[in-house]
């Protein structure tokens, strides 16, 4: 349930109402806007009479909502959430590009790619130290050593780093990581999500390859319910009957999510297609429908990549894409910090 209070309601009246609902074992989320204050009630609100609440002098409007997610719901939080990563802002009109190799392979590789993507305008750097793979015989990542190489590249380039976690037991290794990524395979690893709810740093949550939009938002809810409100959603393609591409980019998901949630949404055109030349047009489409950012795979020698070389851009190709990204972002009224 959402309660919109009248403009200029005295703080003591607001606090009194909050205490009243808390005594009824309801959680109350207070959002103070420029023009109004909104109270979001979480819990069993079936016993509340909306007419009784509307009759209170300080109440302007009461709404019941049906969606099972509350923290991630735009009805509770009308304004866009802006996630700040070391000064790089995502959401609320701010656009960012995250770039780097699928997997961390060497110190030299990460240093070279970090310098290249920064020169082209990327705001953050990605790289997988832990790699979930379909085959147990495929390259699984350098693990702790990979994070060490990421941190060294961060030091030389100044770019914040994004890398994937697979197990809550690995959290101590992520102490200096700027954004923790939850991959598609772990989107519904609820025990992991609960632990990330206790972490004081942004979480990049990728949509599962067979999950609905509501399930994605419910996974975000797990993190936010634990206290961590800095969640970035990522549409990375879903599995359909189509075999021409690795996945099918659900481009319609971006405006739907933006309407239903206040959280920033970015797009991964690399995993969505699995094809290098498709990254450019899919990136343009993502910007056009309102995405708040892109995450693009870039490798200095894609033909020698240990993971996902076919969808990785070379630094020169990435630079060409970024020229159009910058122009398109500006055209649609967003800014790249």
Image (cartoon, rainbow, N blue to C red):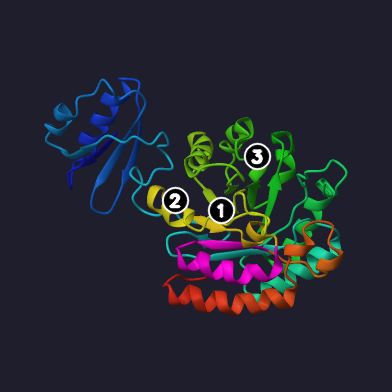
- For the residues labelled 2 and 3, say whether their Cβ atoms are less than 8 Å apart: no
Q: Does 160 sit above or below residue 57?
A: below
Residue carrying label 3: 186
Viewer-closest of 286 and 294: 286
Q: Decide if residue 93 is on the left or right side of residue 14.
A: right
Q: Quadrant of residue 120?
A: bottom right
Residue carrying label 2: 257
- Locate residue 92, reporting x and y percent: 42, 60
Mark 2, residues whose alpha carbon is within 10 Å: few (<14), some, or many (≥20)? many
Determine the secondary structure under disc 3.
Answer: helix
Q: Does 117 sit above or below residue 215?
A: below
Q: Does 127 sit above or below residue 157?
A: above
Q: Decide if residue 186 is on the left or right side of residue 29.
A: right
Determine the secondary structure under disc 2.
Answer: helix
- Locate residue 72, reporting x and y percent: 43, 43
Mark 3, residues whose alpha carbon is within 10 Å: few (<14), some, or many (≥20)? many
Q: Quadrant of residue 244?
A: bottom right
Viewer-closest of 261 and 173: 261
The CA distance from mark 2 to mark 3 is 20 Å
Viewer-closest of 195 and 309: 309
2 or 3: tag closer to the N-terminus: 3
Q: Is residue 290 magenta?
A: yes
Q: Is residue 87 visible?
A: no
Viewer-closest of 154 and 277: 277
Q: Which mark is residue 235?
A: 1
- For the residues labelled 2 and 1, say whether their Cβ atoms are less than 8 Å apart: yes
Mark 1, residues whose alpha carbon is within 10 Å: few (<14), some, or many (≥20)? many
Span shown in magenta? 275-296
Q: Residue at x 58, y 46 (%)?
A: 207
């Amino acid at each position: 349930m959402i309660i919109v209070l009248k403009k200029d309601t005295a703080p003591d009246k607001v606090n009194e109402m909050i205490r009243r609902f808390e005594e009824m074992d309801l959680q109350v989320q207070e959002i103070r806007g420029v023009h109004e204050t909104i109270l979001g009630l979480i819990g069993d609100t079936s016993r509340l009479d909306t007419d009784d609440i509307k009759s209170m002098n300080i109440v302007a409007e009461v709404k019941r909502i049906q969606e099972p997610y509350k923290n991630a719901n735009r009805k509770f939080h009308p304004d866009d959430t802006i996630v700040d990563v070391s000064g790089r802002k995502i959401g609320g009109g701010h656009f960012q590009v995250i770039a780097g190799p699928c997997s961390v392979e060497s110190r030299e590789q990460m240093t070279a790619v970090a310098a290249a993507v920064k020169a082209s305008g990327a705001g953050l750097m990605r790289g997988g130290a832990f790699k979930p793979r379909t085959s147990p015989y495929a390259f699984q990542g350098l693990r702790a050593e990979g994070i060490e190489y990421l941190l060294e590249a961060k030091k030389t380039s100044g770019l914040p780093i994004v890398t994937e976690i697979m197990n809550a037991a690995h959290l101590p290794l992520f102490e200096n990581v700027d954004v923790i990524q939850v991959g598609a395979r772990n989107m519904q690893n609820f025990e992991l999500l609960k632990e990330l709810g206790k972490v004081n740093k942004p979480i990049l949550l990728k949509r599962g390859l067979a999950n609905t939009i509501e399930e994605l938002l419910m996974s975000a809810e797990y993190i936010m319910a634990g206290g961590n409100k800095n969640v970035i959603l990522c549409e990375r393609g879903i599995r359909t009957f189509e075999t021409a591409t690795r996945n099918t980019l659900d481009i319609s998901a971006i405006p739907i999510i933006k309407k239903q949630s206040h959280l920033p949404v970015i797009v991964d055109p690399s995993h969505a297609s699995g094809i290098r030349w498709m990254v450019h047009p899919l990136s343009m489409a993502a910007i056009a429908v309102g995405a708040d950012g892109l995450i693009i795979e870039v490798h200095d020698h894609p033909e020698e990549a240990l993971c996902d070389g076919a969808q990785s851009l070379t630094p020169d190709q990435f630079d060409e894409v970024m020229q159009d990204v910058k122009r398109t972002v500006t055209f649609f009224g967003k800014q790249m910090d």
